[in-house]
Amino acid sequence: MKAGNPPSLKGVIWISSGLFALVHIGNFGGVDWGQYFYLIPFLVLAQFLVGLVLSFIRLQHGMLWAMLFHGTYNACLVIPAVLFGGLE
């Protein structure tokens, strides 16, 4: 019995980046998604692109470097928001 074809790497990267973006939809708290559902693709575009970058880093340099990049990226966004009162 054939085990089947393994999924294509490109497909896995696109799907995982899409899931990464959707998981981060919670970053936009307070948005009425019923009224503004059509904005979801635009709001998560940055997270989708970061997912692609993280996939590249993971494949080229390993999981640790992808995790360090993710933490550094988050810190670059969160630290100024905390310092200047942008987070509640």
Image (cartoon, rainbow, N blue to C red):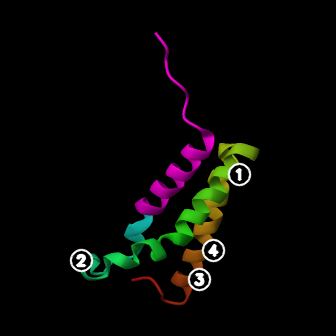
Q: Secondary structure at mark 3?
A: helix
- Residue 80 left/right relative to 35: right
- Residue 57 left/right relative to 9: right
Mark 4 lies on residue: 76
Query: Which residue is depicted at the point 37% across and 68% down?
Result: 26
- 25 above or below 32? above
- Residue 6 left/right relative to 68: left
Mark 1 lies on residue: 57
Mark earlier in primary sequence (2, 1): 2
Query: Which residue is depicted at the point 62% across and 46% down?
Result: 10
Callout 1: few (<14), some (14-19), or many (20+) C-alpha neighbours within 10 Å? some
- 51 above or below 40? above
Q: Pick the residue in front: 4 or 77.
A: 4
- 2 above or below 43? above
- Image quadrant where residue 22 sits: bottom left
Mark earlier in primary sequence (1, 4): 1
Residue range (magenta)? 1-23
Mark 3 lies on residue: 80
- 45 above or below 81? above
Mark 2 lies on residue: 34
Q: Are marks 3 and 1 in contact (CB under 8 Å)?
A: no
